[in-house]
Image: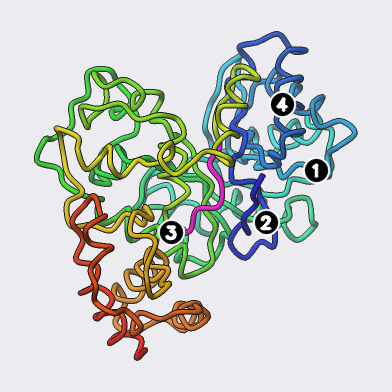
Amino acid sequence: MKKRMLGKTGLLVSEIGFGGEWLERHPEEEAVEVMRYAGKLGVNIIDCWMPDPKSRDILGKAMRGNRENWIVQGHLGSTWQNGQYVRTRDMQYVKPAFEDLLRRLQTDYIDLGMIHYVDTEEDWESLQHSAFLDYVKELKAKGVIRHIGASSHNPKVAKAVVESGLVEMILFSVNPAFDMLPSSEKLEDLLTEGYRYDERLSGIDPERAALYQLCEEKGVGITVMKGFAGGRLFDEKRSPFGVALSPLQCIHYALTRPGVSSILCGYDTKEQVDEAVRYETADEKEKDYASVLANAPLHSYRGECTYCGHCRPCPAELDIAMIGKFYDLASMQPEVPATVRSHYMLLEHKASECIGCRECESRCPFGVAVAERMQKTAELFGC
C-alpha cells in the first residue's frame, strides 16, 4: 500500500482509506473483521463522523491492540440525541459526544480532530471566538487531538477554512461529477435521484479547482469523501456524463487532484476492500478515467489539464502532469508563491527543456495545448 504525507501533519496515510459509516449495517463481529482485514492490507486511516454507539464500538473493538497502526479522523460537532444524528455547536452536546468517542474507540487521543460539517459561511463565521472553537484548541493544546482538521462539501467555505491557518487538513467531497458543479449547489441535491446536471456545464468549477490548488500550495492535506458520488457514477443512466465509471477510475481521479492524500472508501465486505486496494496494482488502462470522460456524450473537460498522465512518456523526460500542477498553482497568484517555486525547482527536468515535439498532445484526451503550457511555465518560473 502506497502512503502519502498528509499535508504538514507529518502523518503518512494510505492512499486508500476507510470510511466507516456503512459498518453499522452489519453484525458487530462481521464489521470488526472487515476493518481488521483492511488494516492487514495496509489501510491505515479511518474517518469516524458517525455519532451512533454501534459504529463507534465497532471501530474501537477493531483497533483494540493495534491503535498505533491507525490514523483516526474523529469529529467534533457530530452528536447522538434521542437515538438520531444531530450536527450541533452546542457545548452541552459537543463535549459529551467527543468524550463518548474517545471511550468507545478505546483511546486517549484522536490523530485528526475534525470540526464537523462546515458548509456555510454563516457557520464558519459563528465559529470564530466561540466556545466550540475554544474547546477544539484546548484539546489540541492538551494533545488529546494531535492535529486540527475540518470537513466540508462547499469549496468556497472550505477555502476560507484553509486560508484561516487554523487547520492542517480537510475532509472534502471529491469526484468528477461534483467537480463540475457550482459551489452554490447543495450536496443533498446532488445525491438525489431526480437531480439533473445542466448540460451546458463544462470543466472543473473554478471554486473547486482553486480549493485544491490552495491546499497544495499551503500544505493542507485533503482526505476524500463521496468519491463515488453515492454510487451514482457506476450507473450510466444516473451518471451526469452519460457513461459509467468504475471504482478504480473514481479513485484515480481523486488521487490525481492537487493536495489529495487519501480517498476514504466505504466497505460492506472484504471483497469491496480488495476491489479498492487493487488500485495499487492496477494497470493504467484500468485506472484511466480521462478517456471515459473525454468520450462521454454529456459535458466536457475540453482544453483542461486534469493531471491524468496520458501525456507520458515524454522524450525529454518531463513530468508533464506535475509541471502542469505547479503552473496552475503559480498562475492563479499575483506572484509565484515561494513554496510552489521551491517544489518546481526540485523537479529533475524543467519546462524549458520541452523540445516542442507535441507527442504528448496527440495522446491528451482533452486536447490540451501542452507545448504552449510548457512555454508559459518556463517563462513564469524562469527555467
Whole-percent x, y for residue 369 in the image: 19, 66
The reply, left or right, for residue 377 in relation to residue 287 is left
Instruction: Check contact, mark 3 vs mark 1: CB within 8 A.
Output: no
What's under tag 2, amino acid-wise? Answer: His
Residue at image x 62%, y 34%?
18
From the top left corner, tell me how far across and down residue 175 is, in percent. Answer: 37, 40
Which residue reaches farthest left?
200
Q: Which mark is residue 69?
A: 1
Disc nearer the start of the sequence (3/4): 4
Quadrant of the frame with the N terminus: top right
The numbered dot on residue 307 is none
Q: CA distance from mark 3 to mark 4?
A: 28 Å
- The reply to whether discs 3 and 2 touch (Cβ–Cβ < 8 Å) is no
Residue pointed to by mark 4? 35
Residues at circles 2 and 4 in contact by the CB criterion of under 8 Å: no
Mark 3 residue type: Pro
Q: Quadrant of the C terminus?
A: bottom left
Query: Which numbered disc covers residue 258?
Result: 3
The numbered dot on residue 147 is 2
Query: Which numbered disc, 4 or 1, marks the residue that appears first in the sequence?
Result: 4
Q: Looking at the image, is mark 2 or mark 4 earlier in the sequence?
A: 4
Q: Position of residue 303 (x, y in %)?
A: 18, 57
| Viewer-closest of 5 and 132 | 5
Query: Is 29 in the magenta?
Result: no
